[in-house]
């Protein structure tokens, strides 16, 4: 059974600081043991402040590979692109800009299916293991219980024979890592902010909760799952 460890932050600013420091510590740990470190980051609005802080950390960034756990099938210039958000935060001028960012191929290919296939090949080249193993997997939690682009009521959460698939949510096709890859990471971290996430967080922590309703429960790594939550999100626990 997956063990969850919840750390509470005072507010969104404290949450961003804790997330940046935790990811930086995990990168340091990985690079003590291996030549390179691979991290997968979530999109959305919650982690942007954390990425800005993380990008200022003095780390051997030239040995770090950065991947997104999921991406909307839009151009990089689109305001909803997770890659665009990373370029404005973690990859903005500063130490973090020295990392190697591997964006998810999107509309430069002919279809979401082609993008998912190309992304799977990219991840397999970067990471060792079957499934591919990331050192850090940072995930968000939707108010409907989704994580990455594994939305309830869609096919994406059920895919276990591929490393990537197409998630469909909120009117957009998305390319996403699948549950086996999310679960293979050495350290999984959920970043949860806001009162609107209280119910989803409670469901994530409930051992009787169905993964059909809350796909985030499909993430079942061998190590403890760290949940960083601000007071508003954790108030219902």
Image (spheres, rainbow, N blue to C red):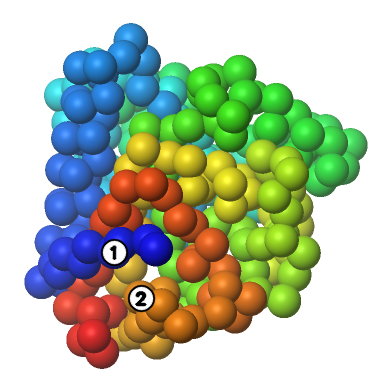
For disc 2, the marked residue is 205
- Which of 48/70 is in front? 70
Q: Residues within 10 Å of mark 2 (few under 14, many from 20)?
A: some
In the rendered view, tell whether residue 130 sits above or below residue 147: above
Query: Can residue 156 be spotted in the picture?
Result: yes
The residue beneath circle 1 is 4
**Residue 194, disc:** none
Residue at the location (58% across, 34% down)? 131
Q: Residue 29 placed where, x, y %?
A: 20, 27
Q: Is residue 46 visible?
A: no
Q: Is residue 146 above or below residue 190?
A: below
Instruction: Classify 167 as above or below 12.
Output: above
Q: Work out whether residue 138 or residue 59 is closer to the camera in this orientation and state it.
A: 138
Asked if the residue at tag 2 contacts the one at tag 1, i.e. Cβ–Cβ closer than 8 Å, the answer is yes
| Residue 179 x/y as whole percent | 58, 52
**Sequence-first disc among 1 and 2:** 1
């Amino acid at each position: 059974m997956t063990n969850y460890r919840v750390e509470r932050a005072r507010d969104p600013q404290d949450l961003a600081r804790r997330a940046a420091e935790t990811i930086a510590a995990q990168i340091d740990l990985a690079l003590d043991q291996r030549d390179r470190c691979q991290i997968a980051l979530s999109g959305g609005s919650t982690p942007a402040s954390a990425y800005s802080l993380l990008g200022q950390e003095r780390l051997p960034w030239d040995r770090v590979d950065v991947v997104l756990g999921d991406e909307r099938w839009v151009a990089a210039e689109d305001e909803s692109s997770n890659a665009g958000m990373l370029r404005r935060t973690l990859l903005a001028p500063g130490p973090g800009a020295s990392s190697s960012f591997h964006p998810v191929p999107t509309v430069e290919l002919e279809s979401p299916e082609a993008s998912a296939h190309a992304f799977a090949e990219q991840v397999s080249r970067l990471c060792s293991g079957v499934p591919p193993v990331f050192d850090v997997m940072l995930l968000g939690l939707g108010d409907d219980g989704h994580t990455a682009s594994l939305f309830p009521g869609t096919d994406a959460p059920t895919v276990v024979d591929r490393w990537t698939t197409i998630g469909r949510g909120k009117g957009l096709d998305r390319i996403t890592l699948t549950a086996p890859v999310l679960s293979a990471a050495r350290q999984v971290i959920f970043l949860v902010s806001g009162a609107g996430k209280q119910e989803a967080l409670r469901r994530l922590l409930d051992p009787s909760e169905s993964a059909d309703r809350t796909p985030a429960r499909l993430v079942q790594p061998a190590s403890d799952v760290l949940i960083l939550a601000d007071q508003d999100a954790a108030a219902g626990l």
